[in-house]
Amino acid sequence: MKKTLKKRMISATAIAREAEKGKDISRHFTNKGKMMPPAIQRVNLDVTRNMLKELDDAAENLNVSRQAVIKLLVRQALNQHYLAQKAKKVTSD
């Protein structure tokens, strides 16, 4: 029976350590992968001071970051929009 060699998996942390030491880490990469665009895109948002205060108050009450509150509220608004669109489509059919 032939013995097959298994490639030893190495963690990203171990590869990073090697790179920090100045070692060649190119053997860990095949260049067969596909570059993916970042999943998150940064945006700027202008809001009034009062709205910012409301967001900060909500964040404090929920014990989360201001960014988390904004994401939550945007997600809720989009869900509501999609449900309204769906209901409008059903009633027009």
Image: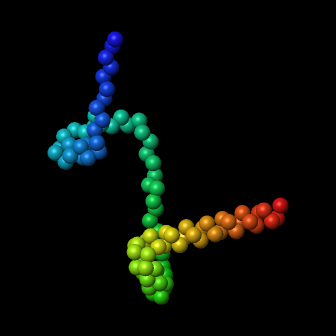
Q: Residue 31's x, y, as percent?
A: 38, 37
Q: Where does the N terminus fall, quadrant-wise?
A: top left
Q: Residue 25's x, y, as percent?
A: 25, 39
In the rendered view, tell whether residue 57 sits above or below residue 6: below
* Between 75 and 48, the one nearer to me in the picture: 75
Question: Which residue is found at the position 80% from the left and 65% from the top?
Answer: 91
In the rendered view, tell whether residue 82 sits above or below residue 5: below
Residue 19 in view here: no
Q: Quadrant of residue 30?
A: top left
* Between 67 and 28, the one nearer to me in the picture: 67
Using residue 7 as the reference point, say whether residue 43 is left or right of it.
Answer: right
Q: Residue at the right extreme?
A: 93
In the rendered view, tell whether residue 79 sits above or below residue 60: above
Q: Where does the C terminus fall, quadrant-wise?
A: bottom right
Using residue 18 as the reference point, say whether residue 75 is left or right of it.
Answer: right
Q: How is the image coloured?
A: rainbow
> For the image shown, how many numbered marks are present on the structure?
0
Using residue 23 as the reference point, say whether residue 34 is left or right of it.
Answer: right
Q: Residue 28's x, y, as percent?
A: 30, 36
Q: Residue at the left extreme?
A: 21
Question: Which residue is found at the position 44% from the left and 42% from the top?
Answer: 34
Q: Residue at the top extreme?
A: 1
Residue 16 in view here: yes
Question: Which residue is found at the position 20% from the left and 46% from the top?
Answer: 17
Q: Residue 27's x, y, as percent?
A: 28, 34
